[in-house]
Image: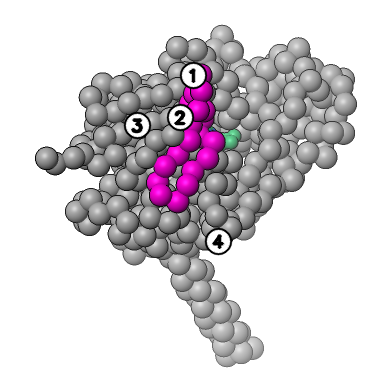
Amino acid sequence: MYEKKRVGIIGGGLVGAMCACYMANRNYEVVLYEKRDDLRKCETETGKSINLALSNRGRNALKSIGLEDIILKNSVAMKGRLLHDYKGETKFIPYDVIGKQCLYSISRNNLNQILLNAISSKKNVELNFNSELISTNQNGSVSIKTQNGIITKSFDLIIGADGAHSALRNQQNNLFSFSQTYIEHGYVELKIESRKSEEMIPNCLHIWPRNDFMMIALPNFDSSWTVTLFMPFQMFDNLKNGDDWMEFFKLQFKDTINLLGESQIGNLSNLKPRSLISINCKSYFSGKHYLLIGDAAHAMVPFYGQGMNAGFEDCYLFDRVLTKNNDDFIKSIKEFSGERIKDGHAICELAMYNYKEMRHLVTKDSYRLRKNFDEFLYRYFPNFWIPLYISVTFTNMPYCNCVINRKWQDKIIKIALFLIIVIIGILLKFLF
Ligand SMILES: Cc1cc2nc3c(=O)[nH]c(=O)nc-3n(C[C@H](O)[C@H](O)[C@H](O)COP(=O)(O)OP(=O)(O)OC[C@H]3O[C@@H](n4cnc5c(N)ncnc54)[C@H](O)[C@@H]3O)c2cc1C
């Protein structure tokens, strides 16, 4: 008798839930283990951002499983960045002047709930909450701590979508190499209530770039805004009480005091800033049975808004590799890892770079000059000259190709500048 292949998924966050949809659609027997309680029953504190920017790669993966429309209906479009200077004056920078594409701000919990509902309706999926992976062994079995004790289960394939601190990854033997980097900046989240929303220009991602630190605000579906302050831990430490925080806000983010309210700002001294980690694995598979996806494979700092998008894209791409290889798991995990690893590394690096761009470079004339130049060429040669941000955010171009693309564009610009200088030099020589 034909037996269905058994796939175990560790982690029922955004990527684990999305992956379960894909695996169930392939008609495997899917068992998902999530360490937390079912967030549809309780408002779980996820310990991460309240809302996220969804872009092309994430949308593409959602579309493939028929969930794009419902997600977009529950999200708010963001057409560009709105920069706030010290005086509160603003400047709008659209994301895509030519294609008019935008990002979508969606609640993390809402998105996760929609994905969990989608998998609950499938007969070949078993969902287990309060079930934590505690160990693995090389023959494809996992030990799970449940409320009724520890159980051991075997699978043909086990997918680790258990986040940046992945237990599945940490359980692999010494030959599995990866590195982790914490940046010196942490973040805290604040909220602008919906009753104040009229004072916020809608449909954009607000940024208060301040060189060494920055604050951003993303819209929520209920008209409120989630505000995130990213700053070096040292600066957080220096602001010791409510008065220090008020002084700081008066100096740096004057236009937000009324929106956030003095009590919320004063209370910042009681909040512990959260850390930001980047994970770099040498491979995304281990042995014959284990595959890492999402943050477990390539957690990144959040400044390109690509962590979830990249994780969703993992699911989409792995599904395609399985189709190509007629569901051969061993071949597929190797092939997926081999092709995807350079993209994982590329987007982690780009995310680090974008922090500098968001908090500092956006205020520079050189940045605007380059952006205008890119947009000019993109307008007239949209298939030839795709600016870096557009390629990462609004196309499915492999991340590493986005970087390669940017490098040759930089070279062309350098050569063009050199030629212009030479021509001017020659002209001046003839004239004088
Ligand atoms: C401040 C901030 C802002 C961000 N903004 C964006 C954005 O705008 N756009 C974007 O694309 N990305 C963004 N990201 C990144 C995004 O949050 C992550 O990339 C995404 O959540 C990764 O999903 P995941 O499912 O791989 O991991 P997680 O969300 O970490 O989920 C892992 C799940 O595994 C479970 N788990 C952990 N250990 C075990 C275990 N041992 N056994 C069983 N279950 C376990 C956890 O409980 C959790 O539910 C942001 C991140 C941060 C921190």
Q: Quadrant of residue 194?
A: top right
At mark 3, the secondary structure is strand
Q: Give the CA separation, mark 2 to mark 3.
A: 13 Å
Residue identified by numbered label 1: 148
Look at the numbered discs 3 and 1 and tell me whether their residues touch, using CB distance below 8 Å.
no
Residue identified by numbered label 2: 151
**Residue under the point 83% across and 40% down:** 234
The N terminus, quarter of image: top left
* Left or right, 143 with reference to 366: left
In this rendering, the label closer to the viewer, 2 or 4: 2
Q: Amino acid at mark 4?
A: Leu
**Residue under the point 59% across and 13% down:** 193
The C terminus, quarter of image: bottom right
Look at the numbered discs 2 and 1 and tell me whether their residues touch, using CB distance below 8 Å.
yes
- Residue 133 forms part of the magenta stretch: yes
Residue identified by numbered label 3: 31
